[in-house]
Image: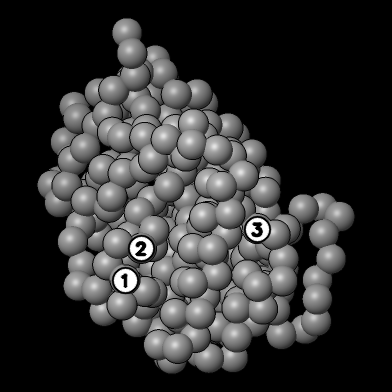
Amino acid sequence: MLPSSIQISGEPLSGAEVRDICRGLRDNAVRLLSLRGCRLCDRDFGRICRALAGATSLAQLNLNLGVVSSPSRIKQLAEALRTNRSIQSLFLHGSPLTDAGLALLNPALALHPALVALDLGDCMLGDEAINLICGLLPPDGAKSGDHVAGMLAVAVASSRTLEVLDLESTGLTNQSAQTLLDMVENYPTALRSLVLAENSISPELQQQICDLLSEGEEEEEVAGGPGDSQERERGREPAAHQRGSSSWMCPSDPSSQMVLMTSGLGDSLLAETEM
């Protein structure tokens, strides 16, 4: 049986539903699991985390809108991510992680071999928490300076797999954005989508970063030839939620890749990304 998807939104989960989800994960029958805004007890959340730890077919996990709602749940998710090797997209938008919660998750994120898309928007993070993302650095990576935004830039530039990073409403400033701009301009990176909406960042800086990311993608398409370009287009799926153009990093270009989640997972996997 081919892996399928489980998508439930804003509903309380019964014990029977949780058992079915866990069975599907253990049987490697689930490729997309979306529980955005769902309500479940701590015991059932732990059962799901233990099941997804060993799942080898799960490629996308959506726990947006407060599912990961406490330190104990953050710890359980981190433990599952340390064991899991298949998740390529992790969505935690609207979770009250705070700096302490990201510190718990960061080592597991850094060691995960397949993670391509990471959504940390509206997770109660700020400039002081950005240095925690340095866990994305490889073991022999070097840090360039003491400022936390500088360390974030090094982490992203060093990652060979991270293509999508959502830092919406995380309290970033022009100082952090300038460092990210320098990173995109001067270092080769796999990053193709960087969401900086609802931060204290000037539209000019946001547009400059967007333009540089667009240039990098265009160069890849030219180098790969028309065949590779067509393959890449088939692997893209627009985000299912519709935002106003002012909510995204490139307000002047509604067709920008910034409204795409481009992990190469196929058309069906990234359809459930609404906030």
What kind of element bears circle 2?
A: loop
Q: Which mark is residue 189?
A: 3
Tell me the crowding category of disc 1: few under 14, some 14 to 19, or many 20 or more residues within 10 angstroms, Cα based.
Answer: some
* Figure colour scheme: one colour
Quarter of the image where the N terminus is located: top left
Q: Position of residue 248 (x, y in %)?
A: 33, 72
Tell me where residue 207 sits by quadrant: bottom left
Q: CA distance from mark 3 to mark 2?
A: 18 Å
Tell me the crowding category of disc 2: few under 14, some 14 to 19, or many 20 or more residues within 10 angstroms, Cα based.
Answer: some
Q: Nearer the viewer, mark 3 or mark 1?
A: 1
> In the drawing, does residue 3 fall left or right of residue 18?
right
What kind of element bears circle 1?
A: loop
Question: If you read the primary sequence from the N terminus, does the residue marked by circle 3 or circle 2 appear first?
Answer: 3
Q: CA distance from mark 3 to mark 1?
A: 22 Å
State if disc 2 and disc 1 touch (CB < 8 Å): yes
Q: Position of residue 269 (x, y in %)?
A: 33, 36
Q: Amino acid at mark 2?
A: Ser
Q: Position of residue 87 (x, y in %)?
A: 49, 37
Front-lying residue, 74 or 258? 258
Q: Which mark is residue 256?
A: 2
On the question of residue 234 being in view, the answer is: yes
> In the drawing, does residue 167 fall left or right of residue 115?
left
Front-lying residue, 159 or 227? 227
